[in-house]
């Protein structure tokens, strides 16, 4: 299983840290979550086999993203070279100073490779050609993920035949994230890995107090279960909190006092469920840190809901004014616009 | 009957090699069989005896017991005593899992018993309250565990199998020892590196011995120590399987130092020391990082000690040889860099052969110098030497690494 494989017209992409997290947490029982920082032979061998066994790859270039990798098992450079020898050009992304030596990058003589101030490489061309169209490529891990996620998400947008009321607004369509999660494996694990990384960077200090991840629907329970493994956090499930149903289970059994909580959802539209859950947590004495989701809808501009706003959702994909038409997603009300 | 722990004598690896092994041979020669008792005076003098064991001796003790039990085809008997004098050491051995690993435990909640010692289990339990750190446990690794042996068959080349095993052990070792590595500022900054170092040593052990490798890591106020012990074929047999290349001719260094005759030692024992040198030399020529590089990084990188024992001899590599090691390390890096250049730039012509041979010859000279220096020191005063010889052969490879707390 390779989770981070993304195809682009000219190259294919792998995120090696995401793959290492899978090797260590799922294929081996090493409970390091996303905190693992070393890349092992097994992971690179898995990527090698994936490429070797695939007969649909037509691209001639492979991009390997080394983000968050701080150590590389000795002698696995040979395996990376074997990938190259399957007749590909290699481009590396996000090389930290500590792994330059293990990858023998100093043996590649190419002036296109430029060290940053931190003595690292944002991009490294693992070949020495003076001329190549690959130098023109713009390769950014975040952008690749965004495009890939959008491409896949499009297939799960179901348009309603008539106005659909939800939390006192009408929705034009419904994004079936439950189906996304069921059908888009293993890619969905890569999305969840990215969500875990975002949570780690947003609450790096608070994570040491072991906040609790709160799930509040069937799909978010799945997300919570994966995140709990990746972030080494406990989970709490609130059942049946939805915009329509209001059926609360008794909460006495869990002691909320002085604990911190992160609310997890699959999709945050207007944030009604999140706010209900937030109120429940705070009413019970817990501290609400914030909320995360796979997909969020940005109904306000980023100026109107600032980064430090506790109600701002952390997500790996946003539906915004830039893509809502393409995704056929729209929220409206029964009111007439003033110029009509 | 041989007592393992003597009154007022800490049972260190040094005591193990220099005294304990000898006693065992004498006892076997005398009685034809062997039995251990845990402490010298048993239930007598319980209020004026003091027994101590250096934790990193435990892997050696297990490794030796395993060899003996294989020889006698049954577990070796060990008499236990539970009294005021033994309660501390019994408590430590028990909580370090020594009795689980050595006995016949089948309960999967505890380490699998390897059936190498037989003892009265009713002596175990109801211990003093003091618990040693839960990470201070002796571990047993075997190629037969975790289905490693069958998973390994997927890889064709020996190097790949080794890389695969190292990566598997990284995941296991991290779980076992990472907490301890965080306790020493010297090791915590390079925890990933040390996890890998241990995995590589364990991999060597299980590959050579094809059975059990015992390991333990221990941290105190002064240093982090770990000890890894196997019953394998040893270095000489492994070297015999290496084929000749343009760079390496089998036993080239050894043949040279065999002729030097600086030490006046039994030739079989001396041969053993020379094999250790040859092994390090071979490792320094390879296109893969290996034993030589581990040793250099422990000594030059962390100011630590690297003690390598096989069969009859031990070599202790430390900063006392700083100058020579530095020289070797520079040459090795130059050579390795050429290996890497060839690999990375896919250079198939032999343009670097001459340069490589030149470095190889320099390495040979440096090794010869190191050998001479060590031997001359030994002749001067063997007590402070970095080499030690034992008349009793203790099969396998036994490595101790010590990294001071900076």
Image (spheres, rainbow, N blue to C red):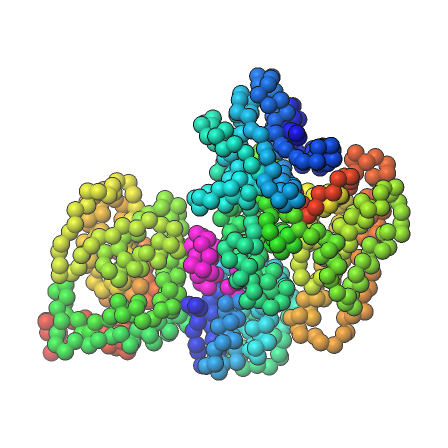
**Residue A124 appears at what percent x and percent y?**
56, 69
User: Which image quarter: residue A162?
Assistant: bottom left
**Residue B185 appears at what percent x and percent y?**
56, 42
Taken as a whole, is the magenta stretch helix, strand or loop?
helix
The magenta stretch is: A18-44
State how many labels appear. Answer: 0
Q: What residue is rendered at 47% in x and 26% in y?
A: B128
Q: Nearer the viewer, residue A298 or A41?
A: A41
Left or right: B264, with B33 as reference point: right
Quadrant in which the C terminus of chain B appears:
top right
Residue A34 painted magenta: yes
Q: What residue is rendered at 52% in x and 62% in y?
A: B151
Residue A239 painted magenta: no
User: Which image quarter: residue A330?
Assistant: bottom left
Above or below, A105 against A28 in this view is: below
Q: Nearer the viewer, residue A9 or A135?
A: A9
Q: Nearer the viewer, residue B243 or B330?
A: B243
Left or right: A46, with B18 as reference point: left
**Residue A144 appears at what percent x and percent y?**
41, 72
Q: Is residue A109 visible?
A: yes
Q: What residue is rendered at 27% in x and 52% in y?
A: A214
Name the residue furthest front: B32
Quadrant in which the N terminus of chain B appears:
top right
Above or below, B228 against A156 in this view is: above
Q: What residue is rendered at 29% in x and 76% in y?
A: A154
Q: Is residue A289 visible?
A: no
Above or below, A12 against B402 in this view is: below
**Residue B56 appears at what percent x and percent y?**
61, 38
């Amino acid at each position: 299983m390779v989770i981070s494989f993304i195809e682009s017209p000219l190259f294919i992409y792998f995120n090696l840290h995401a793959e290492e997290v899978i090797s260590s947490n799922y294929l081996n029982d090493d409970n390091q979550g996303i905190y693992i920082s070393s890349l092992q032979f097994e992971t690179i061998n898995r990527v090698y086999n994936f490429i070797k066994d695939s007969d649909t790859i037509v691209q001639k270039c492979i991009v390997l993203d080394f983000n968050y990798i701080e150590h590389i098992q000795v002698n696995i450079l040979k395996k990376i070279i074997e990938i190259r020898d399957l007749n590909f050009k290699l481009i590396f992304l996000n090389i930290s100073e500590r792994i330059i030596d293990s990858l023998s990058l100093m043996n590649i003589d190419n002036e296109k490779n430029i060290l940053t101030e931190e003595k690292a490489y944002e991009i490294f061309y693992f070949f020495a050609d003076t001329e190549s169209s690959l130098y023109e490529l713009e390769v950014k891990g975040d952008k690749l993920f965004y495009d890939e996620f959008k491409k896949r998400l499009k297939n799960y947008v179901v348009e309603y035949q008539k106005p659909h009321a939800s939390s006192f607004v009408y929705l034009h369509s419904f994004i079936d994230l439950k189906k996304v999660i069921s059908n888009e494996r293993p890619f969905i694990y890569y999305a969840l890995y990215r969500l875990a990384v975002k949570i780690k960077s947003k609450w790096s200090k608070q994570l040491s107090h072991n906040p609790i991840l709160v799930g509040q629907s069937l799909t978010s329970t799945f997300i919570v279960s994966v995140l709990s493994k990746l972030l080494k956090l406990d989970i709490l499930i609130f059942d049946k909190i939805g915009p329509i149903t209001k059926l609360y289970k008794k909460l006495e059994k869990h002691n909320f006092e002085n604990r911190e909580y992160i609310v997890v959802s699959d999709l945050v539209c207007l944030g009604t469920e999140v706010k209900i859950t937030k109120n429940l947590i705070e009413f019970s004495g817990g501290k609400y840190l914030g909320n995360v989701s796979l997909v969020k809808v940005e109904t306000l501009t980023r100026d109107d809901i600032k980064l430090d706003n506790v109600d701002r959702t952390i997500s790996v994909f946003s539906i915004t004014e830039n893509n809502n038409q393409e995704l056929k997603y729209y929220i409206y009300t029964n009111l007439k616009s003033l110029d009509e | 009957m041989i007592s393992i722990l003597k009154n007022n004598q800490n049972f260190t690896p040094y005591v193990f090699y220099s005294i304990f092994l000898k006693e065992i041979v004498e006892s076997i020669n005398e009685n034809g069989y062997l039995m251990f008792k845990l402490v010298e005076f048993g239930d007598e003098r319980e209020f004026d005896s003091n027994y101590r064991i250096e934790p990193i001796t435990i892997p050696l003790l297990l490794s030796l017991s395993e060899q003996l039990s294989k020889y006698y085809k049954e577990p070796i008997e060990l008499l236990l005593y539970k009294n005021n004098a033994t309660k501390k050491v019994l408590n430590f051995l028990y909580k370090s899992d020594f009795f689980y690993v050595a006995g016949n435990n089948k309960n999967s909640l505890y380490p699998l018993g390897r059936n190498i010692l037989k003892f009265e289990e009713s002596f175990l339990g109801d211990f003093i309250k003091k618990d040693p750190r839960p990470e201070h446990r002796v571990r047993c690794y075997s190629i037969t565990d975790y289905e490693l042996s069958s998973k390994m068959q997927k890889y064709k080349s020996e190097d790949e199998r080794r890389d695969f095993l190292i990566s598997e052990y990284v995941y296991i070792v991290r779980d076992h020892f990472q907490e301890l590595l965080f306790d020493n500022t010297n090791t915590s900054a390079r925890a990933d590196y040390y996890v890998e170092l241990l995995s590589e040593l364990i991999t060597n052990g299980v590959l050579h011995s094809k059975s059990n490798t015992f390991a333990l890591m221990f941290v105190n106020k002064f240093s982090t120590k770990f000890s890894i012990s196997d019953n394998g074929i040893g270095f000489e047999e492994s070297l015999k399987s290496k084929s000749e290349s343009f760079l390496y001719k089998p036993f080239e260094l050894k043949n040279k130092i065999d002729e030097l005759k600086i030490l006046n030692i039994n030739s079989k024992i001396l041969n053993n020391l020379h094999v250790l040198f040859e092994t390090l030399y071979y490792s320094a020529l390879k296109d893969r990082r290996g034993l030589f590089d581990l040793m250099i990084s422990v000594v030059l990188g962390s100011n630590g000690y690297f003690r390598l024992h096989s069969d009859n001899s031990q070599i202790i590599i430390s900063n006392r040889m700083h100058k020579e090691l530095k020289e070797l390390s520079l040459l090795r890096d130059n050579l390795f860099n050429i290996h890497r250049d060839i690999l990375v730039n896919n250079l198939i012509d032999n343009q670097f052969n001459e340069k490589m041979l030149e470095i190889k010859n320099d390495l040979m000279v440096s090794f010869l110098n190191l050998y001479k220096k060590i031997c001359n020191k030994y002749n001067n005063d063997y007590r402070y030497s970095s080499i030690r010889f034992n008349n009793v052969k203790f099969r396998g490879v036994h490595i101790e690494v010590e990294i001071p707390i900076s």
